Amino acid sequence: QVQLVESGGGLVQPGGSLRLTCAASGFIFRGYTMSWFRQGPGKERELVARIAPTSSSTNYADSVKGRFTISRDNAKNTVYLQMNSLKLEDTAVYYCYVRSLGVDYWGQGTQVTVSS
């Protein structure tokens, strides 16, 4: 079965950095677009970034452009989200996502808290 397991969240000061990791299994990872979403306190879940199967294209939310970088390693079935220059408003639970054979799959989420 499809499994997405996120890690790397934590508490960081404004301006700091974190790298999130999503380990995927149960599907042909190299064939699918992978995405990171987030849901902040009292907010709707929103797309943060996504990456094409061969890393040929990436897309970012305007709010994270220039600060976040999504990447993937198809040999390791892993997708990453490098987050730099973190802001208070980046505080959220971050989720890994894939749509496979018409079904949406989500990881359990990893908490990122930006606070001084």
Image (spheres, helix red, strand yellow):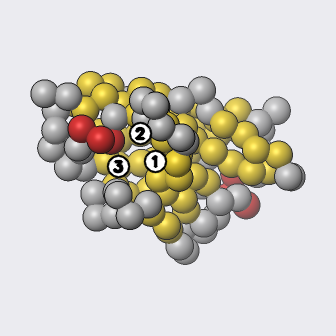
Q: Is residue 33 left or right of residue 10?
A: right
Q: Is residue 20 left or right of residue 75?
A: left
Examine the image and state in which quarter residue 70 appears: bottom left
Please report the residue visible at 13 percent of the width from the left and 27 percent of the height from the top: 116
Determine if residue 76 is in view: no
On the image, the x and y values in percent for residue 29 come to 69, 51
Type of residue at label 1? Tyr
**Marks 3 and 1 close (CB-CB < 8 Å):** yes
Distance between the alpha carbons at the discs numbered 2 and 1: 6 Å
**Marks 2 and 1 close (CB-CB < 8 Å):** yes
- Label 3: how many residues lie within 10 Å, few (<14), some (14-19) or many (20+)? some
User: Taking 50 as reference, is 14 above or below it?
Assistant: above
On the image, the x and y values in percent for residue 62 come to 38, 64
Distance between the alpha carbons at the discs numbered 2 and 3: 6 Å
33, 45: nearer the viewer = 45
Please report the residue visible at 52 percent of the width from the left and 48 percent of the height from the top: 46
Distance between the alpha carbons at the discs numbered 3 and 1: 6 Å
Type of residue at label 2? Leu
As helix, strand or loop, the secondary structure at mark 2 comes to strand
Q: Earlier in the sequence, mark 2 or mark 1?
A: 2
As helix, strand or loop, the secondary structure at mark 3 comes to strand
Judging by the rendered image, the residue that carries numbered circle 1 is: 80
Q: Is residue 81 left or right of residue 109?
A: left
Q: Earlier in the sequence, mark 2 or mark 3?
A: 2
Judging by the rendered image, the residue that carries numbered circle 3 is: 82
Q: Which mark is residue 20?
A: 2
Looking at the image, which residue sits at the far front?
A: 42
Please report the residue visible at 24 percent of the width from the left and 38 percent of the height from the top: 88
